[in-house]
């Protein structure tokens, strides 16, 4: 039950890069991916900025070498690209050699297709074939088919904590001896449903998001996919594999406070961080960097800040930053891309900057890291909090 969970591969596509290397260069140079909408059809184009990936579905299909006439959703295409890179990064040539599973997560699923044809299903029955793509599990199965994976496939959809919970579930499957390795992460494309929904909630900014700033107005939505490969210690030793990092701790809690808002005292976030620290066996003083959820909404940043102070104590909160000012909030993919960013931070001993920060919040004395900073990093705590109070924390370690 105390098996070490090694991370042996990772893959990502986001608005700041089409692979791990490109994302790292953008994080290093402070190059964000928040822009006007160009690829996505919406009446909000020109008025709302997003973290949009500037590749058409046709571009993605060509990159993946898929047949031109396919019904694959954008969410699935992004997921395929990231999962493929993760598997190749892990040096896996025979994906079914060991007991291997895929735990993917999504919130948009195939809405980018099903909402497009919504008003035509009755008049054009032949377009009803797209309805199947709406199911969240459709993208997971498409990714598994692309990888030719024959093992367990499961889907998690817990809003913005989805990928963290997928990573957590994968770790538990290995710890309990059910699987030897698991490809875990999340993928989400932009959709009218999410863009209009967040706009209705009035938590989108009219400019660039400013996490943990006193004058923050809201978030920018983004699209992305990221996966990491978890492997048991036994497989790592047998294959003499290079380990990128270890998943040392994880926690999930629900404060049952509100459908969309975080609790005023950060109870869900507090419990998730507390549990992750307990499972890792680490002291709070061992955490070198926190990749905060940091959505730049008034509610989240205040709640998360209070929770961090409750865990670490006033004046003792580790250095932290939100990378969502680079990518936007990518919903179910957020914890996946931030897992990759956390591993990159440890590999290169740097803290990535919290872009756009100007003024410290009035409610507490917390200031994020605003410029690229070199620091020896052994343990990173990464937070992801979803609607409905579903809060998750992951801890990544060098050894």
Image: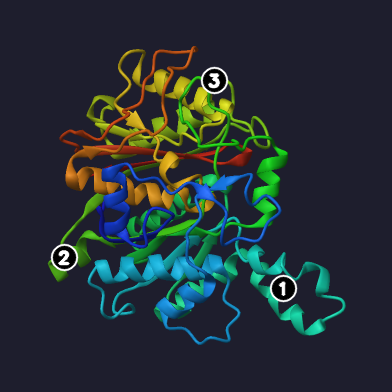
Q: Which residue is mark 3?
A: 265
| Towards the viewer: 284 or 147 | 147
Between discs 3 and 1, the one toward the N terminus:
1
Numbered label tally: 3
Instruction: Identify which residue, 147 or 202, lies in the foreground.
Output: 202
Label 1 Cα neighbours within 10 Å, binned few <14 / some 14-19 / many ≥20: some
Percent x, y of residue 337: 39, 51
Q: Secondary structure at mark 2?
A: loop
Where is residue 195 shown, x and y percent of the image? 65, 49
Q: For residue 9, what is the image quadrant?
A: bottom left
Give yes or no for contact between labels 1 and 2 (Cβ–Cβ under 8 Å).
Answer: no
Residue assigned mark 1: 131
Q: CA distance from mark 3 to mark 2?
A: 43 Å
Label drawn at residue 6: none
Q: Could you tell me residue 347's position as x and y percent? A: 19, 48
Q: Residue at x 58, y 26 (%)?
A: 299
Q: Which residue is mark 2?
A: 241
Secondary structure under tag 3 reads loop
**Left or right: where 71 falls relative to 392:** right
- Residue 112 x %, y %: 64, 64
Q: Residue at x 72, y 73 (%)?
A: 131
Q: Nearer the viewer, residue 231 or 130?
A: 130
Q: Can you see residue 219?
A: yes
Q: Secondary structure at mark 1?
A: helix
Say if mark 3 contacts mark 2, CB within 8 Å.
no
- Give the CA distance from mark 3 to mark 1: 41 Å
């Amino acid at each position: 039950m105390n098996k070490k969970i090694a991370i042996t591969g990772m893959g990502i596509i986001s608005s700041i890069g089409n692979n791990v290397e490109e994302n790292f260069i953008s994080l290093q140079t402070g190059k964000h991916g928040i822009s006007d909408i160009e690829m996505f059809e919406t009446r909000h184009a020109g008025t709302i900025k997003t973290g949009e990936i500037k590749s058409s579905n046709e571009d993605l299909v060509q990159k993946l070498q898929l047949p031109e006439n396919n019904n694959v959703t954008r969410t699935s295409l992004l997921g395929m690209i990231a999962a493929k890179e993760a598997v190749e990064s892990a040096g896996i040539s025979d994906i079914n050699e060991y007991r291997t599973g895929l735990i993917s997560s999504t919130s948009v699923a195939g809405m980018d297709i099903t909402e497009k044809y919504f008003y035509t299903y009755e008049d054009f029955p032949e377009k009803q074939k797209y309805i199947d793509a709406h199911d969240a599990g459709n993208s997971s199965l498409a990714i598994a088919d692309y990888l030719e994976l024959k093992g367990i496939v499961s889907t998690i959809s817990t809003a913005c904590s989805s990928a963290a919970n997928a990573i957590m579930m994968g770790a538990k499957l290995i710890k309990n001896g059910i699987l030897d390795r698991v490809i875990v992460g999340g993928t989400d494309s932009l959709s009218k449903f999410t863009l209009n929904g967040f706009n209705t909630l009035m938590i989108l900014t009219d400019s660039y998001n400013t996490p943990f700033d006193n004058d923050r107005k809201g978030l920018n939505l983004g699209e992305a996919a990221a996966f990491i490969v978890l492997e048991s210690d036994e497989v790592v030793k047998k294959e003499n594999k290079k380990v990128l990092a270890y998943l040392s701790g994880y926690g999930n809690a629900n404060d049952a406070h509100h459908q969309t808002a975080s609790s005023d005292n950060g109870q869900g976030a507090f419990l998730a961080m507390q549990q992750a620290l307990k499972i890792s066996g680490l002291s709070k003083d061992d955490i070198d960097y926190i990749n905060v959820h940091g959505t730049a909404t008034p509610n989240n940043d205040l709640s998360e800040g209070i929770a961090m102070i409750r865990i670490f104590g006033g004046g003792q909160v580790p250095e932290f930053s939100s990378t969502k000012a680079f990518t936007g909030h990518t919903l179910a993919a957020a914890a996946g891309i931030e897992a990759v960013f956390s591993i990159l931070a440890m590999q290169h001993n740097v803290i990535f900057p919290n872009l756009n920060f100007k003024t410290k919040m009035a409610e507490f004395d917390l200031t994020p890291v605003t410029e690229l900073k070199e620091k020896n990093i052994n343990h990173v705590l990464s937070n992801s909090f979803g609607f409905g109070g579903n809060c998750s924390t992951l801890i990544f370690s060098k050894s």
